[in-house]
C-alpha cells in the first residue's frame, strides 16, 4: 500500500479545509464588493456583528489565523508517519469544526462571548493540539 493510499482520508480532510477556506474568501470578497462605495482592501470600521460583511470578513480572517498551523501540523504528521487513523480523525474534526464555525458565524449576529461558534473554534483548536501531541509522541 502506498503512502498516499494510507493517508487518503487525511488528504480528503485537508482538501475540505482548503475548499472551505477558498469559499470563505470568496464569500467575504463578494459580500464586501457588493457594498455601496466599497474600497478594495478596506473594511468599514463602524461595522460589527450585525453586518454580514463584517461576519464574513471575520470568518475568513479567523481561518487565516487558524488554518496555516493546522495545515503545517497535518503535513508534519503525515510526513512523520503518525498513526493513520488518528491523523485522519484529528484532521476531519478540525475540518468539520471549521465548517460549523463558519455556518454559525454567518448565521448568528451576536456579540456575546462565548458564542455558539466559540465552541467549534475550541474543538478545532483541540484537534490541532491533539495532532501536535501525536507528532511529539511519534518522535519520542
Image (spheres, helix red, strand yellow):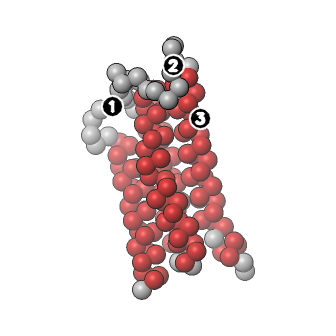
Could you tell me if residue 124 is visible in this image?
A: yes
First in residue order: circle 3 vs circle 1: 3
> Which residue does the image show at 56% across and 19% down from the upper left?
34
Q: Residue at x 36, y 54 (%)?
A: 122
CA gap, disc 3 and disc 1: 23 Å
The disc placed on residue 26 is: 3
Residue located at (59% from left, 58% from top): 14
Q: Nearer the viewer, mark 2 or mark 3?
A: 2
The residue singled out by tag 1 in the image is 110
Task: Count neighbours of disc 2 (C-alpha within 10 A) and say few if under 14, some if 14 to 19, many if 20 or more.
Answer: few
Q: Earlier in the sequence, mark 2 or mark 3?
A: 3
The residue furthest top is 36
Near-viewer residue (107 or 78): 78
Q: In the image, which disc is placed on residue 38? A: 2
- The answer to whether marks 1 and 2 mark residues whose Cβ atoms lie closer than 8 Å is no
Say which label, 1 or 2, has the lower sequence index.
Answer: 2
Residue that extends furthest to the left in the rendered view of this protein: 113
Q: Outermost residue, right direction? A: 1
Q: Residues within 10 Å of mark 3 (few under 14, many from 20)?
A: some
Q: Which mark is residue 121?
A: none
Element under label 1? loop
Amino acid at each position: 500500500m502506498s503512502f498516499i493510499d494510507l493517508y487518503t482520508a487525511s488528504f480528503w480532510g485537508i482538501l475540505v479545509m482548503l475548499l472551505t477556506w477558498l469559499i470563505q474568501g470568496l464569500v467575504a470578497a463578494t459580500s464586501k464588493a457588493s457594498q455601496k462605495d466599497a474600497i478594495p482592501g478596506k473594511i468599514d470600521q463602524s461595522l460589527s456583528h450585525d453586518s454580514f460583511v463584517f461576519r464574513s470578513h471575520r470568518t475568513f480572517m479567523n481561518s487565516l489565523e487558524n488554518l496555516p498551523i493546522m495545515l503545517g501540523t497535518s503535513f508534519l504528521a503525515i510526513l512523520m508517519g503518525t498513526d493513520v487513523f488518528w491523523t485522519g480523525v484529528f484532521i476531519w474534526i478540525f475540518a468539520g469544526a471549521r465548517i460549523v464555525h463558519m455556518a454559525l458565524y454567518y448565521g448568528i449576529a451576536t456579540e456575546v462571548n462565548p458564542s455558539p461558534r466559540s465552541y467549534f473554534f475550541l474543538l478545532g483548536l483541540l484537534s490541532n493540539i491533539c495532532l501536535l501531541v501525536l507528532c511529539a509522541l511519534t518522535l519520542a
